[in-house]
Image: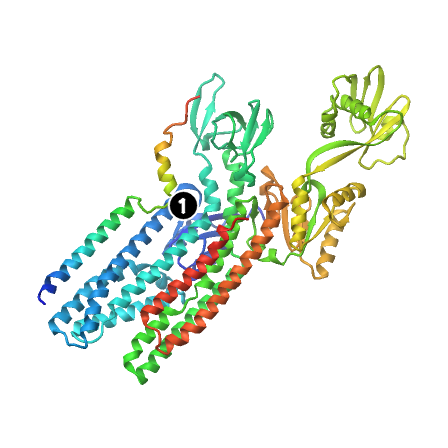
Amino acid sequence: MTIVLLLIPLGLVLVCVAAWALFWAVDSGQYDGDVEAQGLIAVEHDEPPRV
Amino acid sequence: MMSAAASDSRSAFGIEGMHCANCAASVERTLRGLDGIHSVSVNAATGKARVDWDPTRLTLKPIFEAIRKLGFRPVPLAGEVAEAAAVKERRSALKRIGVAGLGMMQTMMFVYALYASGAHGIDPGIAQYLRIAGMLLTTPVLLYSGMPFYQAALHDLQRRRVGMDVPVALALTIAFTASVYHTLLGTGEVYYDSVTMFIFLLSLGRFAEMSVRQRSLSASEALSRTVPAEATRLHPDGVTERVSLARVVSGDRLRVAKGAVVPVDGRLLSDAASLDESLITGESRPVSRRTGEPVAGGAIIAGNAIEVICEKPASQSTLAGIIELLQLASSEKPRTVAVADRVASWFSFCTLALALAVAVFWGVVDPQRAMPATLAVLVVTCPCALSLAIPATFAAATSYLARRGLLVVKPDAIERLPRIDSVMLDKTGTLTEGAPVATVESTIGITPDRALAIAAALERGSDHPLARAFQRFADPNVTAVDFHEHPGCGVEGIVQSRRWRIGTPEFVSGQSGLETDSLLYLGSDEGIAATLAIRDNLVAEGVNSVRQLQAQGLNVIIASGDTTEAVRAVAATLGVREYHARMTPQQKLDFVEQTQAKGRNVLMVGDGINDAPVLAAATVSCAMTQGAAIAQAAADLLLLNGSLQSLATGIRVAQHARRIVRQNLAWALVYNLVSVPLAAAGLIAPWVAALGMSISSLVVVTNAARLAWRRT
């Protein structure tokens, strides 16, 4: 059963990695909702059309 | 003497970091303690505050300072700042849930190993290793994900109140402290799994509540966001320039591109425009405007690009007025919500008392069960139907109606609307589209068509508003020359070599004593040839709307200052059986009061300016108003699209809101009556209790959100 001595710290490290990945995803706006608005970025005009 | 208006300033702003009704109550109490504050209303569900104060004794700065000292952050409501705050709140909630979830899964395994191995015996070294691992995982979860519960509970305690977070924070503290103690001791039960699970499940519930709250904010915010930050200004030499909207002043010529939002109130310079005014009126069909006609800020250009001349700075536009009203309305608290707040606080206090009793009882009877039973009681009770669902319901109803052209200015009106059984309409302007059309009442010696053609020819040269009533009858073969307008009397001119007059009987025939009500006379040198009437055309929709109101079981009454014939005609067309004509404002007021004395609840619909006393007397008042008049209208509701249809919807939505509040209260009652005794008896495991509370709060909040999703 000595393997748990290794596996448990490994589990803790994996949790930390998962938490870091989640923080990264949230902070880069992956879960900000409004999926449509993200799609519109591609077709948005940077400037109003000249007339 | 100083006027009341001069010593009164009013502001609405957002407050970040409020978790419950008690936070709102503590802000209210603190602000009331400031010198110079007239009134304060803080709504926890919408996160908004409304403050009236005396600017000679106080400024906004100390008010914000006081709020910050309580641990909350005041934020401006409009535009991007509020949006950024919402995004930040959402992101940090997601991170907290994620951390709690990950921690929960791992802790579960460690603690399960301890439980499962208990029967077979476990190597004490490994058992201790598992306990320490659990502690290492749970500590960051508690400190990070559990922080909002502690912050909220701390706020409550600082204000010497008990909110719904106090029992939760207590449960977390007890479970964690006991676990750490047993870990250090190296023996005994640990509850790390319970701690992480509480935090995870309760955070999930909070997240759902937050989503509903943020959606309810959006009625005014959606509007604020549509206002562009810049405008395209045209100079006389043809040069265009992008300027900040704040720098646009009256008299500026602006170009608005297709699909863009008109940033200010102004007049149209282009020949024609097609505008989508749905943001302002809820009406999605485009309207057309011609040169010189007003264009409201907030209208979207449906046709080609237009040029407008600015009449008012952006801060005074129609749209700005609507946004301000919406913000003021959403920061005020309906009476039901205030009562619910108090009950919820009392409820949380009882939970604490009960938990103590349970701990003592089981401590004596069966110490093994004392801990789980106490934790279960603390976590299972759910006052969320009171402190969260009721405000959320009202907020959802308000924002739903705002999108359909009905602004709820006084939040209390939503509570009173379902009781309405009579709708009293003032005919003028409310039932008619304001496009008068002439009709022939009688003729002597000429055909009605010819009478109208002559009248149209004469009125062509007149600026009088009624002249529009003849426009459609103009005949190119019948023209008038040499016409003169006699103000207050009528118009005269020569049509086909004969002198005709149109106007009052005295002016046309020289006789007096003829009936003058709504009648115009047409005559030549040979005497009166025709009598004409000017009628307002009923909006076709008006007929439908009245039928709809009647179908909802409402008694529709017309009370108008107009002539008997005019009112009778309107009533007959609409199918309204009860009507009263020639009523003075005082008579209208008396009539409303008499109707109410009979036990009826009257919804009065008027223009909001001239009939303010009548509106004030009614159970619920509604002003039909447009444009700049919005800000002055004194009424509970503002009907922006002039369609009674929205009013019928408003009553239905208010009834729906009342149903939802009742359902939620019934649910809360049943849930707590069942779960609390079971938890106290030790029959509910702590994790079931946390799940129960989360599901219960989800049930009530989702039920409240149903209102925002309804179709009609």
**At 28% from the left edge and 55% from the top edge, which residue is drawn?**
B98
Residue B377 relative to residue B563: left or right: left
Q: Is residue B685 above or below residue B300?
A: below
- Which of B497 and B245 lies nearest the eye of the viewer? B497
Tell me what residue is drawn at x 41 percent, y 66 percent.
B382
Can you see residue B38?
Answer: no
- Count all numbered tags in the image, as a single digit: 1
Snapshot quadrant of residue B27: bottom left
Provide the residue designation for mark 1: B82
Question: Chain ID for label 1?
Answer: B
Residue B187 in picture, x, y percent from top left: 17, 75
Q: Amino acid at mark 1?
A: Ala
Q: Secondary structure at mark 1?
A: helix
Residue B497 located left or right of residue B387: right
**B75, above or below B532, in the image:** below
Dividing the picture into quarters, in which one does residue B84 lie?
A: top left
Q: Residue furthest bottom?
A: B365
